[in-house]
Image (cartoon, rainbow, N blue to C red):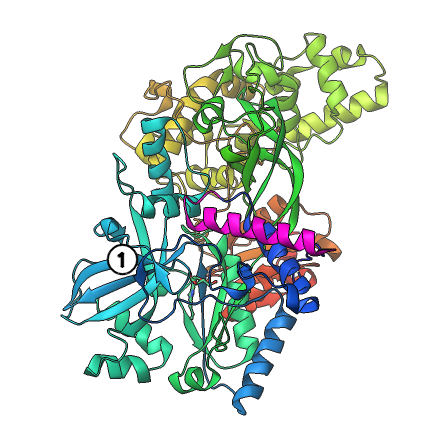
Amino acid sequence: MTDAPPFTPLPDNAAYVGAVQLAVDANAAYYGAGESPLDDDAYDRLFRGIQAYEAEHPDEVLPDSPTGKVAGGAVVGDVPHTVPMLSLDNVFSAEQLARWIAGLERRLGRPVQAYSVEPKLDGLAISARYHGGKLVQLVTRGDGTAGEDVSHGIGTIVGLPLELAEPVTVEIRGEVLMTSEQFDAACAKRQAHDGTTFANPRSASAGTLRAKDRPYTCELTFFGYSALPLPPDDASELAIRLRELPHSEIMELVAALGVATTAATPVAGIVVSTVEQIQERVEELKAARAELPFGIDGIVIKADSAADQVEAGFGTRVPRWAIAYKLPATEKITKLLDVEWGVGRTGIIAPRAVLEPVELDGSRVTYATLHNPADIARRGLKLGDSVMVYKAGDVIPRVEAPVVHLRTGDESEIPIPEVCPNCGSEIDRSQERWRCVKGRGCRAVASVLYAAGRDQLDIETLAESRIVQMLEAGLIVDFADLFTLTREQILDLDRMGETSTDKLLAAIEQAKTRPLSRVFCALGVRGTGRSMSRRMARHFATMDAILAADSEGIQAVEGMGPEKATLMLAELVELLPLIDKLRAAGVNMTEPGVTPPAPGAAAGVTAGAATGAEAGAGAAGGGDGDGDGDAEVPGAEGAPIPAVELPLTGKTVVVTGSMTGKLADLTRNEMNELIEQAGGKSSSSVSAKTSLLVAGEKAGSKRTKAESLGVEVITPDEFATVVAAFL
Ligand code: IVH
């Protein structure tokens, strides 16, 4: 992203009038019930179009225009603000930010010594008035000069204590929002009550804050971002400090009074002094965004000192000493065109939304997950609906909710399959995630193909068409049968010559010697992909030890919670016959170089300890082993510390970008295996704990983050030298 999002030019006065009306309506909804017909990005473009038209036609500017207001069209309340609650101007790129900084410093006639850089929280501005330390009134921003009294919300907002640590009179301003947990809880409550859900955390917060007589309450969260003397001309010691202290120290004071600030979050406000440092922090906040438990839609940069703020002053609707660096939208409204039903390699039947393509967080989104049929019902989705779609970072895009008030009446019910869409068998509907009654058998081709894949058994010459032939000829029912195929059986297959048969047999023979981590991965345990399989193998060392483990034993593996362990046990019970077949065929069941843990006392799978429960985790991956939620766990347990010092002993290594040179052909999984063989831990995310980043071509935010954290960054060639002994 290099510049502001494009806007649609308004050709004439009629278009301008229409645009202003749309913006006013959208604003009223945004600040009102919280259900705007426009997403943030569309609103920004509309706003810029209006601004551009007004610059060309200053005599046509309408009094209602959102450009002249702090928050145009907002639900105006009757509680006057002590000091106007202003908005912020936006920049959309590093260049624009640099220009803004230069402009501010030019206006001041000196460099700004300190900038405060903090997250722009994606919620609603609110003013909280404390008298003698007691929270007495909550007021929304409204039109910036007067807001609505929402004091009925007192007591439901985490972070806004009823009483401060000191009996002071002060006005704290900040953002009210819902964390993802609070949002889920709010949706569940609303669902139980009237069968609908909220479109997103922001509109849920807006609706909740203004709702006076809902039969249920939903919890909200507050983070303060400023504090003012109350009344504005107050002459108390606190009031004087609030006028004189730098912003960062006011934030410390607010936190000391017991009000939440972002200081306690991974995106705490920091003070820096150069444009480069601001940029670095912007990159860090960008990188942290997808993992945060609350939404941020930008980064706010403020001149920290009171003197700089006073001297820079205010424009008509915004301060000149602060700016919002907007991040690309993670949420947009688009059309739900179709729902496709896929069957994963474990037989899970999963719906997928086909969308009118939208640009979200820098990528084009056409498909989004719909989780399961219950989810469709819960959200009340229909074909043709306008839907709010969310995507940030590497997360799988998801449909959040229909935008019900944009319905035209042309929407139709989403057809729900009666039988397995892959094989026509019955559907097991006993869990929220539906499954074909044939389970893995339904997707035999996909599961054999997955098992033979490069990161699993790596049977290079086994093509999908060949697997289909073998299944159709009844030669195999699962991938374990590959190991007992005879030369004659293979030769009998269509288009199979002597040479290719021998090649395939040799590849199959070779596959018997793969380490346990790969054999385990080949099983396709739901919710368990490559990195979890490596951790399992390195922890247990043998298949016997895995099968002997109980839930507690399995939970000793990094990244294994109780739910995942229960699922794993259930899956292992189901997979026992397959494992036995593999063992009988002579497939390796141990991890080289790892010693098994001392035998545990508790009975494991072999003693029938597992239940048939199919708890939570695991998406119906398309057969590539990546749809299983098996992310690398930062700081995950890697190889046990061996007696001999290996080149990466004690180091946590992250790989990013495309590998080159000797490492060019290695998959990410193979790179991670290499790291672990060389004694290191592999991780997918950069943090202060990272020792080394291997940055290949087109390395992006991970590289920036590593550099800002002072983590050593090396090229693939340099890394190849470090691990030369293992290549
Ligand atoms: S300071 C005079 N700091 O963004 C300066 N605002 O687009 C007023 N916001 O109305 C705002 N996070 O609702 C400030 N760290 C932050 C913020 C923040 C979110 C919101 C706030 C404001 C809007 C402006």
Residue type at numbered disc 1: Leu
- Classify the position of the N terminus by image quarter: bottom right
Please provide percent x and percent y for residue 202: 43, 48
Confirm whether the magenta stretch covers residue 276. Answer: no
The residue positioned 63% from the left and 71% from the top of the image is: 96
Q: Is residue 681 above or below residue 226?
A: above
Query: Chief secondary structure of the magenta span?
Result: helix
Tell me if I can see residue 648 in this picture.
no
Above or below residue 127? Residue 295 is: above
Indicate the position of residue 126 as horizontal and vertical percent values. 34, 59
- Give left or right: position of 99 versus 320: right
Q: Which stretch did the figure color magenta?
A: 10-35
Q: Secondary structure at mark 1?
A: strand
Rendering quarter of residue 611:
top left
Q: Which residue is mark 1?
A: 138
| Percent coordinates x, y for residue 648 in the rendering | 53, 59
